[in-house]
Image (cartoon, rainbow, N blue to C red):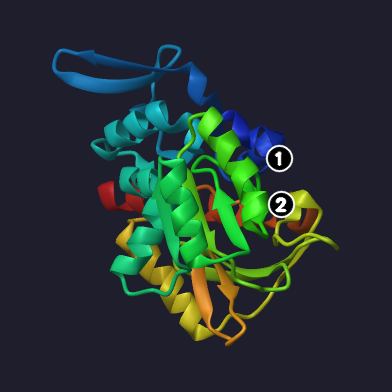
Amino acid sequence: MAKLCIVAGPGGDNVKQMIIQEAKEFFETVTYVSIKKVRIALENGKSQAFYKDTSLDSFDAVWARGFFEDYRLMEILLDILEESTVFLVNSTEGFQVCNHKYLSIQAAVRLGLPVPDSYICVSPKIANELAEKIGFPAVVKLLSGFGGKGVMLANSKKEFLPLLETLTLFREFITGQEFVASEATDYRVLIIGSEVLGIRRKGAEGEWRANVSTGGNAEFVPLDSELIEMAKAIASYLNMRVCSVDFLKTSQKKHVLIEVNFTPGMLQKIFKNQIAQKILAFIKKNVEERKKESA
């Protein structure tokens, strides 16, 4: 009897019911837990994570679907479960790095992967100087953004300064990135264990971002071997079994890595339940293999 626990933040509520329904096709017991209802306890020299009175290490597998807003508690939860016998889809390190947009770009650079010129700072004066150095248009990102939210384009210094003032007002880190003209199209490499899927996303008319959540479209496409190898490299580096890696194609036809996602979007509007099914099948396969090994 296989037991799955799905721990998620509010950022995953839009696909909650679909994921629960699909999970019941693979697992006899499915428990969906809001990260806000997880209790962490350090007793008798051991840290444990609980939902109500159930320890999460009593499940066969835990699929953590977390975002930046869930950072503190999810980070501790993953760290605890890594010390248990539970099959964990992704690592604590993967969560930490992917939920900090600049760290994910920095990880790519360490592997020698191409990325757009980027910067992070807290000083508006320094941000202004760096933006002028990189040039306009410039992309401004919130560290906590996902699904296309918190990503803004400044076409000039005149447009950049109000964004700068707003970020400073809300005490946000100022992160900027070189703008890559890509006709609102990007390429997502979805990694699910040894399976790799290619997705081309196209932004809605008048949109500069390639996001389905803002009205765009997507389709499965074959991928260049170069993209596959780059995505696999960073997934392995961050110990991520399931993730998505996004690329833009430059005017010189070269690909640059722009983001690594700990919690890949289900893109349910386009692909229905297909992505959830593939991830759940991967988790179930690993649980079954572990049970055979321990039998």
Indicate left or right for 211 with 102 as reference.
Answer: right
Residue at the image position 42 percent from the left and 40 percent from the top: 61
Q: Can residue 44 be spotted in the picture?
A: yes
Cβ–Cβ below 8 Å for labels 1 and 2? yes
Q: Can residue 2 be spotted in the picture?
A: no
- Residue type at tag 1: Met
| Mark 1 neighbour density, 10 Å: few (under 14) some (14–19) many (20 or more) | some
- Residue type at tag 2: Asn
Residue at the image position 74 percent from the left and 58 percent from the top: 271
The number of callouts visible is: 2
Tell me residue 27's x, y (percent).
55, 40
Q: Please name whichever residue, 92 or 167, is drawn nearer the observer in this view of the structure.
A: 167
Tell me residue 50's x, y (percent).
39, 19
The answer to which image quadrant residue 46 occupies is top left
For mark 2, give the secondary structure.
Answer: loop
Indicate left or right for 78 with 258 as reference.
Answer: left
| Mark 2 neighbour density, 10 Å: few (under 14) some (14–19) many (20 or more) | some
Taking the view exactly as shown, the residue that stands out farthest to the bottom is 252
Q: Mark 2 points at which residue?
A: 273
Give the mark nearest the N terminus, 1 or 2.
Answer: 1
Q: Mark 1 points at which residue?
A: 18
For mark 1, give the secondary structure.
Answer: helix
Q: Please name whichever residue, 278 or 176, is drawn nearer the observer in this view of the structure.
A: 176
* Marking on residue 97: none
Taking the view exactly as shown, the residue that stands out farthest to the left is 45
**Looking at the image, is 23 positioned above or below residue 216?**
above
Indicate left or right for 167 with 44 as reference.
Answer: right
Instruction: State the CA–CA distance, disc 1 to disc 2.
Output: 7 Å
Residue at the image position 37 percent from the left and 65 percent from the top: 108
Tell me residue 240's x, y (percent).
39, 55
Residue at the image position 72 percent from the left and 67 percent from the top: 184
